[in-house]
Amino acid sequence: MGGAEILVRARGLTKRFGDFHAVVGIDFSISRGEAFGFLGPNGAGKSSTMRMIGCVSPPTSGELTILGLNPVTDGPAIRARLGVVPQENTLDLELTVRENLLVYGRYFGLPRAVIRERSAMLLDFVQLSDRAGDQVEPLSGGMKRRLVIARSLINEPDILLLDEPTTGLDPQARHIVWDRLFRLKQRGVTLILTTHYMDEAEQLCDRLVVMDGGRIAAEGSPRALIQRYSTPEVLELRFDPGDHEQAAEKLRGLPAERLEVLADRVLIYITNGDEALAAVRGLGLEPLTSLVRRSTLEDVFLQLTGRHLDD
Amino acid sequence: MSSGPATLRMPLPGLLGRALAGGRGHGRGGLPLVERNARAYRHLWILLVAGTLEPLFYLLSVRIGLGALVGPVTGPGGRPVGYTEFVAPALLATSSMNGAVYDSTFSVFHKLKYAKVYDAALATPLGPGDVALGEITWALSRGLLYAVTFLLVLAALGLIHSAWLLVAVPASVLIGFAFAGVGMAATTYMRSWKDFDFVILATLPMFLFSTTFYPLSVYPRGLQIVVECTPLYQAVTLLRGFSLGVVGPAMLGSVAYLAVLGLAGVYVASRRIRRLLLK
């Protein structure tokens, strides 16, 4: 990580709700200017971790330092320097688009003139200038999400926290959000995000941790994780449901690195997918469909946990 | 810092600080939330007007209807007073109660459970104490508006007999503070809209029986004690004393009662918001 300034540091960070262990002793460090991701399925402990970093949920035990401060005692001072995009939008439906920014800026104690100037720039940045005077309710899901992102930037935060930034958006709206987040990253804003979309993690994160059951299963850049936990290519085969089991049994004879038999598909992890497909045909098997693709974080997750991200 | 809202925070700042222990953000109190509510109400100004009219309608009905049928009654200090003069301060007290209770219960519950206004605010430097103080300050600001309008109408009807009546304005604000505090604290325990029946169950009998329409002397002593324990009775006593110019040291008791109620409300509300939203 070089000598970059560490903005968030956790050691043995733990969160319990009664008997439920949401986060179990995790360690991580996030440097200035990084885009850092928590990747994992629902219930992995991502949001609990985010809420602790956002100083709206006190850690049960362990050590957490944000911007060199303690979230339990210095919550307001830390929150003054954070931007938060929560999982739920929490926009103020009794106010207009512009008023949402004005009022939120006032929560930070910013002077009205400063907020007005920044709101105009931010609404332009998220392409909502023409909706400034409108009510929030009729906006589309993607527009609301962009407005929340604009709102989170009103205090020019050191760190932007994004909890599932594109969950529930249609593909086009997701790409617009990704584009805006990518621009922020280019400007050097430190991004911390949670996601259960591997493509989102691959697109946005310099480095990420894979979470499962409140623990960190692996850590690294998307490319390094794929190199370490998967093969360069994956051959996906689909057989007639009746032949599925039998075919899978035969495929175990292949010289593959790893074989995953799913309910509807067989995944063969291998260096060269086309050669593997030829070998499959050599065994006398004729799959209904076959696909050779590169390994993704989804494969990393499957290897680490034996489950899918959206399970 | 602008002077208007700062004066609203004047009563007992030290105690208030203690009531909010640990719940303060930047030390700007709830002002940003008051500003938020004022902006939201700019779209709903008609509701403000309606709230202001409520006690006036009551007053007119008494003036035109009941007042003509009922003769003078025994006022504070055993002095006979006209019926409208007797009832008017009680109506103002009731309106202060209703306005504060409405703002701190229905409106707060909506923001707490559905609109997620406080979740958004707590992600900023604001703390749960700021949220509680902000909502309560807003509720009593409305109380102030109602009180001033009401007094202007009383003046227009020629019903003002004492300069003490001016003290009824800050007294109305105190009444608003007491009921908003209790209302907001109670709201943090509500599970669904059905629980709001309890709000009606508490306020309606108080309105009918807390010496609003007749003096305390009509009750047997046992019942008198019960009535004396209700916050609305204390509020009515306070405003009636000021409006009729019968002022005594016993009124300090009413002031203390209402202040303690409000402070306890702020304390409980800010602790409960922490428990509910900062898990």
Image: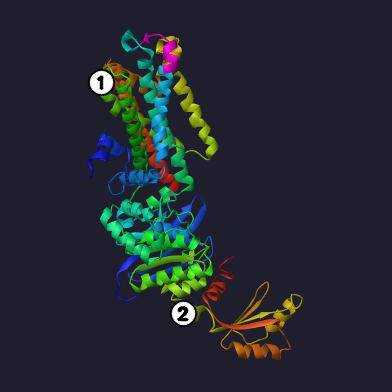
Residue B73 is a magenta residue: yes
Q: Residue at x 30, y 44 (%)?
A: B29
- Classify B165 as above or below A42: above
Q: What span is colored magenta in the figure? A: B64-74
Secondary-structure class at tag 2: helix
Nearer the observer, B105 or A190: B105
What is the chain identity of the residue bearing mark 1? Answer: B
Which corner quadrant of the image does residue B43 belong to? top left
The image shows residue A234 at horizontal and vertical percentages of: 58, 82
Q: Could you tell me how far apart the alpha carbons at marks 2 and 1 are, in whole angstroms?
A: 78 Å
The image shows residue A176 at horizontal and vertical percentages of: 45, 69
- Classify A291 as above or below B154: below
Q: Residue at x 29, y 37 (%)?
A: B16
Secondary-structure class at tag 1: helix
Q: Amino acid at mark 2?
A: Arg
A61 sits left or right of B200 in the view: left
Q: Residue at x 47, y 75 (%)?
A: A202
- Classify B265 as above or below B87: below
Q: Which residue is mark 2?
A: A223
Q: Which residue is mark 1?
A: B164
Which corner quadrant of the image does residue A53 belong to? bottom left
Marks 2 & 1, CB-CB < 8 Å contact: no
Q: Amino acid at mark 1?
A: Trp
The image shows residue A211 at horizontal and vertical percentages of: 49, 66
Residue A107 is a magenta residue: no
